[in-house]
């Protein structure tokens, strides 16, 4: 299925649900990367002194994207109230 076909067949609500799921449960590539990073971290940390141990994030190739806004309703209200203030 092409991106265009998917865009025509998927509602915006369904797309939002998939995006939310991607932030909470990584898809295959992210999951594989996390697994490999855990192995690298384990191998590193068992072979160095405790004070030289590194966290998992140091072994991730790609830094995770910032999560979406916590409270979307507040963000939307802020934007619209700013627009209304400018018109007044």
Image (cartoon, helix red, strand yellow):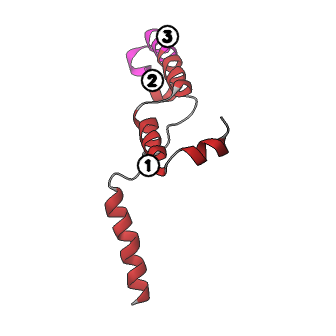
The residue that appears at 65% across and 34% down in the rendered structure is 1
How many C-alpha atoms fall within 10 Å of the one at disc 3: few (<14), some, or many (≥20)? Answer: few
How many C-alpha atoms fall within 10 Å of the one at disc 1: few (<14), some, or many (≥20)? Answer: few
Determine which residue is flagged by label 1: 13
- Front residue of 4/73: it is 4
The residue that appears at 60% across and 42% down in the rendered structure is 6
In the rendering, at what x and y percent does residue 10 appear? Answer: 53, 44
Instruction: In the rendered view, tell whether residue 78 sits above or below residue 68.
Output: below
Label 2, secondary structure: give it: loop
Instruction: In the rendered view, tell whether residue 26 sits above or below residue 65.
Output: above
How many C-alpha atoms fall within 10 Å of the one at disc 2: few (<14), some, or many (≥20)? Answer: some
Determine which residue is flagged by label 3: 43
Q: Is there a contact, CB below 8 Å, between mark 1 and mark 3?
A: no
Q: Which stretch appears magenta? A: 39-55
Label 1, secondary structure: give it: helix
| Principal secondary structure, stretch drawn in magenta | helix
The residue that appears at 56% across and 44% down in the rendered structure is 9
Q: How many marks?
A: 3
Question: Which label sits in the foreground, 1 or 2?
Answer: 1
Residue 47 among those drawn in magenta: yes
N-terminal of the pair, mark 1 or mark 3, is 1
N-terminal of the pair, mark 2 or mark 3, is 3
> In this image, 61 relative to 25: left or right?
right
The residue that appears at 60% across and 48% down in the rendered structure is 8
Instruction: In the rendered view, tell whether residue 15 sits above or below residue 53.
Output: below
């Amino acid at each position: 299925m092409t991106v265009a076909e998917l865009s025509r067949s998927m509602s915006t609500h369904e797309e939002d649900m998939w995006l939310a799921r991607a932030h909470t449960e990584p898809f295959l590539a992210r999951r594989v990367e996390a697994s490999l990073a855990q192995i690298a971290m384990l191998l590193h940390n068992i072979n160095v002194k405790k004070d030289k141990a590194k966290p998992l994030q140091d072994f991730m190739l790609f830094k995770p994207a910032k999560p979406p806004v916590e409270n979307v309703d507040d963000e939307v209200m802020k934007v619209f109230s700013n627009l209304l203030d400018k018109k007044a």
